[in-house]
Amino acid sequence: MITKKVEKALNDQIKLEAQSSQFYLAMASWAETQGFNGTATFLYAHSDEERMHMLKLVKFVNERGGTAIIPQLEAPPVAFESLNYIFEELLNHEVAVTKSINNVVDVCLQEKDYTTHNFMQWYVSEQIEEEGLARTINDKLNMIGKDKGGLYLFDRDLETMAATSTDAQ
Ligand code: FEO
């Protein structure tokens, strides 16, 4: 059984994961309309992953005697100014997600809920990977700058990355 405080922290996390999924879906759709098909494939897959993060939390809350709340979400932007902007936003968003996960872990410790604490460790490790990946992509984009050929290759690389991470699941 989870306490009300842990339930609230987990429901806040459900909302954030749902928002991440929605936000990355909007980015994917925009990238597709701009002809960045590799980036779109990568972001569509990333959006699916965030939905999986949300679902895992929903099931956990219900299993532990709480009630998962499926949140209402604000509409994400329709257009983005550039690929650089997208991936800077993605990194900022992931940093905020990490902060929120750390908060859930903190609440678990305050409430002496070691079961949820243990469950959350998967998210702690996942965030190290997600932030690391977002930083690598930003570094690549900063190196490429406005070089069109570089951006073309970058987009192709992301398609491969998306295929590799889907295979790994
Ligand atoms: Fe589910 Fe990207 O954090």
Image (cartoon, grey):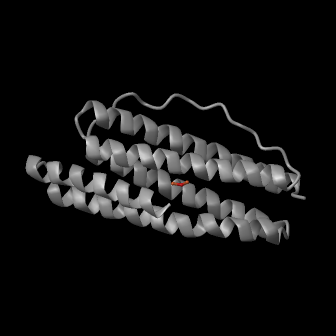
Considering every residue shown, the one lying at the far front of the view is 167
Number of residue marks? 0
Q: Residue at x 37, y 61 (%)?
A: 164
The residue at the point 83 percent across, 44 percent down is: 67
Is 17 placed left or right of 86 in the picture? right
Quadrant of residue 157 in the image? Answer: bottom left
Image quarter in which the N terminus is found? bottom right
Residue 39 versus residue 140 in the image, above or below: above
The residue sitting at 60% across, 32% down in the picture is: 73
Q: Quadrant of residue 166?
A: bottom left
Residue 10 can be seen in this image: yes
Seen in the picture, residue 22 relative to 5 is either above or below; the reply is: above
**Residue 79 in the image, given as x and y percentages of width and height:** 34, 30
Quadrant for residue 142, please give it. Answer: bottom left
Percent coordinates x, y for residue 114 in the rendering: 81, 72
Name which residue lies at 87% across and 51% down: 4
Query: Residue 168 placed where, x, y %?
Result: 46, 64
Instruction: Confirm whether residue 80 shows in the render.
Output: no
Where is residue 96 drawn, in percent x and y?
53, 54
